[in-house]
Structures are given as structure tokens and as C-alpha cells.
Amino acid sequence: MTAFNIAVLPGDGVGPEVMAEALKVLKAITTKFGHTFSVKDDLVGGAGIDEFGTPLRPQTVQMCRESDAVLMGAVGGPKWDDPTAATRPEDAILGLRKQLELFANLRPVKLFDPLLGSSTFKEDVIRGVDLIFVRESTGGTYFAEPKKVWTENGKRVGVDTTQYDEDEIARAVKLGFELARGRRKKLVSADKANVMASSRLWRTVATEVSKDYPDIEFSHMYADACAMHLARRPKDFDVIVTDNLFGDVLSDEASMLAGSLGMMPSATLAVGGKFGLYEPIHGSAPDIAGKGIVNPLAMILTTALMLRISLGLEREAAAVESAVERALAGGARTPDIAQPGEATLSTSQMGDAVAANL
């Protein structure tokens, strides 16, 4: 039996609802495999602003540093959408990424066969899709300065800056190559080198890194062309590495290959590739918060990633993923993945179905 310390940050909106189901599955893992998960939780995002006046406290960052891994729900919502506010809920996740040096966001896209009919794509296009994004997550457009809105000659003007240094690019690309070695040995680097100077540096550094991986089939692709080919021939992709902004957009598009954002887990890893923050890629979905209809499978599959990557529990991670597939094969559906006329489960009932299949 092994003991692990997990920091839990439920967040806002549907975050606490999906987190409850992830913890339910962790409890089932404890029963089945005998591990102990010591959980400490805290408020971040909008909940943190309401309670403490800040989306992310130093105490919370320290709690995360002292943990083996961090499980996080989602942050944000209309309540905190004042564009003039000094701080926003999203500053919690951006702050955690920066302060914990969480440099690479992994977003697997895998279609479970029972959901072939849930996607808007043709079955022959998406059957067998299994790819993963490596999204650089501490640089680029979301962090670079200047970033501001001002008035000039009577007109409002806004600017965002995209900036990378070669080390930031190299470590993300290297991780992509290492992942490709354990998969189908194919890597695509997506950029906009035709129009962006930062992308031209990205392409140059990626090419340099590729020389250390002659066994990997490597290619460049413009991000917009990548978006098109993800819809046209997604099975051609294995690993896609890209910057912060393009990774955000492209992986959200790719979520539809898996049937729903509610099926998409993610892991954001620190330097060294062991410690990580784990969160589903969907947002806080305030329009359905509290209704008991949100799909918890992305959060549950995110928990499986935590078990595998940060805790080294491969057998337990595979058991969770198999339990999800068995629940789906048995007809378990939440509204986002149900076809017309299919019966649906509540959030809690879906969590129960996965736990029962462990």
C-alpha cells in the first residue's frame, strides 16, 4: 500500500461537481488497490476572489508544492467577468502554471468506440483516432507583455504580445519527441511561421531539436492547415506540439473527435515531467452548474492521467480508463454524449457507473 498527497482545487461552476466524481473514483481505487490518498483542498478562481479577495493565495501555491500532484476543476464565470477588474479567476490557473513551472500541457484525444455515434464526424473518419497535443503553457500570448487596452486619438486600442525564447520552445518540443518515441513515432510541429516572427523561431528550434530524434517522423505544419487536417484526416496524427495559443484552439477543435469537451482530460507537467496539475479541458460551464448534468468523464480520465504520470500507478490508471469504457459500452450517457432518444444519467450517476465498473 502506498500513500500519496493530493492537492484538490475544485474551482467554480461545474468544477466542484466533476471533482466530487473524481474523488469518488479515487476512493474506489483505494478500495480495490489499497492505496491511500490524502486530500487537501482550497478555494481558487472566482471562489477564491469571493472568500479571500484573490484568485490564488501564496498558501495555495505552497500546498500544491508539498503535494504529489494537483487535481483542479475549472475557474471563471459571468459573476467575475468585469473587464476592468484588477484580477480575474483565470489568474489562478495562469499563476499556478507560472509559479509551479508547469511548462507543457498534454491533451490526449482518444475516441472510445461506444461513442462513435456521438461525434458529428463520419465514423470512418474518426474510428481509431488516438493523438496527443503537447501545448507549451508558460509562454506565448497568454503571458507576454505588453498586454493592455488604452485610448489613442479618441479610439480604444488593444494589444497582446507573443514572445518565446529558444529554451521555452526546446523543452516543449523535446517532450513531444519523447512521447512520440513511446507511441507511433510521428510528430507534427504546428506554427504560423509564414506570418509570425515567434513562429519562425519556433520552427527553427524545433528543427534543431529534431536532429536528436532521427527515429521520429517529423514535419512542420501551419496551425490553420493543422486545423483543417484534424477535421479531414485526424487518424494521420500521433503527437502535435505547438504553442500556448494554437494549442488551446486546436485541442478544443479536436475534442469534437472524441464526441464532447466533456471527454477531454489534460495534464500540465513541471520541469522533469513528474509533478503535474491535472484538469479537464472544459471550462466552468456556469449555464449548467448545479443542474447535475455535466459530464464528469473528462475529470475522471484526468484523474487516470494523474495516477499514471505523477503517481506512477499504471495498472490503476488503466483500470480507470477501462471502467470508463465499460460504463459507456453499457449505455451510460450524460446529455452531451447522448444521441436523440437515449436515456441519460446525472453527473453523480455517471460517476457511480464508472466506480461500479472498477
Image: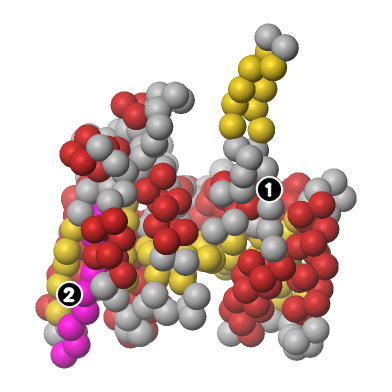
Instruction: Give the camera-side residue of 107 and 243.
Output: 243
Circle 1 crowding by C-alpha within 10 Å: few under 14, some 14–19, many from 20: many
Residue 342 visible at all: no
In the rendered structure, the answer to whether residue 272 lies left or right of residue 219 reads: left
Mark 1 lies on a secondary structure that is: loop
Q: Name which residue lies at 65% across and 77% down.
A: 174
Residue 90 placement: quadrant = top left
Residue 348 visible at all: yes
Mark 2 lies on a secondary structure that is: strand
Magenta-highlighted residues: 1-13
Q: Which residue is mark 2?
A: 37
Residue 88 placement: quadrant = top left
Determine which of the numbered discs, if any, sits on residue 26 in the image: none
Q: Name which residue lies at 21% across and 41% down.
A: 52
Instruction: Give the camera-side residue of 149 and 240.
Output: 149
In the rendered image, residue 316, in percent from the top left (x then y), is placed at 29, 80
In the rendered image, residue 56, in percent from the top left (x then y), is placed at 31, 49
In the rendered image, residue 210, in percent from the top left (x then y), is placed at 77, 79
Which circle's residue, 2 or 1, is located before the other in the chain?
Answer: 2
Q: Name which residue lies at 29% across and 41% down.
A: 54
Residue 323 placement: quadrant = bottom left
Q: Amino acid at mark 2?
A: Phe
Q: Amino acid at mark 1?
A: Thr
Asked if residue 20 lies in the magenta stretch, the reply is no
Above or below — where is 208 with respect to 287?
Answer: below
Q: Which residue is mark 1?
A: 162
Q: Which residue is most to the right?
A: 194
